[in-house]
Amino acid sequence: MSNPTYAEIFSDGLWRNNVALEQMLALCPLLAVTTTATNGLGMGLATIAVMIAASLLSSLLKGVITPQVRIPAFIVLIASVVTVVEMFINAWMHELYKVLGLFIPLIVTNCAILGRVEAFASKQTARASLADALAMGLGFTWVLVVVGAVRELIANGTLFHNASLLLGEHLHWLDTTVMDNYQGALLMALPPGGFIMLGFLLSIKRLIDQHRMKPATNNTLTQLQEA
């Protein structure tokens, strides 16, 4: 495997190979927990922590783990990291733990994490693996936050509701009431709202990608005509 640059790693993680919008992985937590931006942010931070720890450990242990047992070893490694993260959230962010509930242990089955550990971290240096995990985690997190923010705004007229309760008093400023006496749209708080928002984001990404590809296509055609 060639050694990608850090710019390529972050470009892939944040946009070009985004976990949710391009790979279409980890859709279960994306659709289930994003009723508010706070929940999306909490799940995103937990996923980032697991991805970083699992990728870093996998990269450091790549010379020890044999190819024959790599998949079971990676799953055990990810499960161990998830357990530690779950215990930390339960101890220090108990309200967030009660909201996210079952979806924290389900990070173990997140194909995005296992996929990056297998395809990248187990073949690259620790530094590159750390950058890849951070990029992929941030890419997944911004999608969670955007979906949660729009659903929360349309459903309740608020943004980052209970941020201080779930993530600590130092983030109380995130809790904002955008529309007072807003009646709300219940549909966006229900599971169909998650599918609607995901569809909009996928469409927007495809349109942006097509728009960015047009200049390159036009330049190629021009060069062929001149030749």
Image (cartoon, helix red, strand yellow):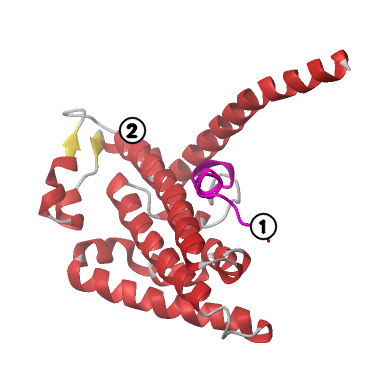
Could you tell which of marks 2 and 1 lies nearer the N-terminus?
1
Up the image or down, 31 lies above or below 186; here it is: below
Where residue 191 appears, as percent x and y from the top left, is 44, 48
Magenta stretch containing residue 8, yes or no? yes
Residue in the image at 28% along x and 76% along y: 87
**Which secondary structure dominates the residues rendered in magenta?**
helix
Residue 188 part of the magenta-drawn span: no
Q: Which residue is mark 1?
A: 2
| Residue shown at 46% from the left, 75% from the top | 57
Q: Residue at x 61, y 32 (%)?
A: 206
The answer to whether mark 2 and mark 1 are in CB contact below 8 A is no
Q: Nearer the viewer, mark 2 or mark 1?
A: 1
Identify the residue at horizontal 52%, vertical 65% (top origin): 113
**Bounds of the magenta span?**
1-17
Using the image as rendered, state which of residue 71 and residue 180 is in the foreground.
Answer: 71
Instruction: Give the Cα separation between the discs numbered 2 and 1.
Output: 45 Å
Q: For residue 225, what is the image quadrant?
A: top right
Residue 72 tag number: none
Can I make out residue 38 in this image?
yes
Image quarter where the C terminus lies is top right
Quadrant of the rendering where the N terminus is positioned: bottom right
Residue occupied by mark 2: 154
Q: Horizontal and vertical percent for residue 218?
A: 74, 18
Q: Amino acid at mark 2?
A: Ile
Percent from the top left, x then y, of residue 32?
A: 42, 54
Dot 2 falls on a residue whose secondary structure is: helix
| Residue type highlighted by circle 1 | Ser
Up-down: is 59 above or below 197? Answer: below
